Image: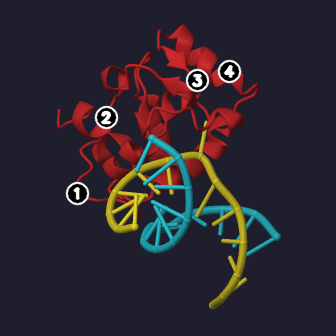
Chain colours: A red, B yellow, C cyan
Amino acid sequence: MFVTKSMPLMNSLQAHDKDVSFFDLVYQIVRLIPAGRVTSYGAIARYLGTGRSARMVGWAMNNAHTVLPEIPAHRVVNRNGLLSGRAHFKPPESMEQKLVEEGVFIKDNQVQFFNDVFWDPATELKIN
DNA sequence: AGCCTGACTTTGT
DNA sequence: GACAAAGCCAGGC
């Protein structure tokens, strides 16, 4: 398991205390990202306490389209605001399209006004 | 049990 | 700014 003390949401996330996998935790956090906002792989990794495993977050997204409820995977970009995961959408343009529909400005596969749109779980999900 | 692969990030040139 | 290298670690083979 990947449970750490620095996980304010663990209680609610673990509601069904079965075996909560790293993937599940990633998915649940991604589902909390509000429309029109984005976060990064690293931000999610840090929030989960596995700060240097951003790649695992991205890797978890590979199966994102296979689980329900649906996961707004298009709201996860890299730390520079680049739509690095676009190639995994079908079609690839749908990632940008979905973000645009939510009011996010995209230029050259990069989120504009990134700092304003960025949603950091570590600060947004601070202790209730 | 090893070896390889990343929807990544940080650090150092 | 660009670029390279290294750390990361679960799955698949």
Q: Which mark is residue A28?
A: none
Please give the chain letter of the residue carrying mark 4: A
Is the C-beta separation of discs 3 and 1 under 8 Å?
A: no
Q: Which mark is residue A108?
A: 3
Taking C1 as reference, is B3 above or below it? below
Please provide percent x and percent y for residue A29: 41, 37
Q: Which mark is residue A5?
A: 1
Q: Is residue A93 left or right of residue A115?
A: right
Please provide percent x and percent y for residue A12: 32, 39
Q: Is residue A9 left or right of residue A66?
A: left
Please give the chain letter of the residue carrying mark 1: A
Please give the chain letter of the residue carrying mark 3: A
Q: Nearer the viewer, mark 2 or mark 1?
A: 2
- Badge 2 amino acid: Asp
Tell me the crowding category of disc 1: few under 14, some 14 to 19, or many 20 or more residues within 10 angstroms, Cα based: few
- Badge 1 amino acid: Lys
Q: Which residue is mark 4?
A: A94
Q: Nearer the viewer, mark 3 or mark 2?
A: 3
Q: Nearer the viewer, mark 3 or mark 4?
A: 3
- Badge 4 amino acid: Ser
Nearest to N terminus: mark 2 or mark 1: 1
Please provide percent x and percent y for residue A98: 59, 16
- Badge 3 amino acid: Asp
Q: Which residue is mark 2?
A: A120
On the image, which quarter does residue A35 sit in?
top left
Nearest to N terminus: mark 3 or mark 4: 4
On the image, which quarter does residue A79 sit in?
top left
Q: What is the distance, in whole Å, between disc 2 and disc 1 at their CAs?
A: 18 Å
Marks 4/2 same chain: yes
| Residue A13 visible, this angle | yes
Give the structural element (helix, strand or loop) at label 2. Answer: loop
Taking A121 as reference, is A106 above or below it? above
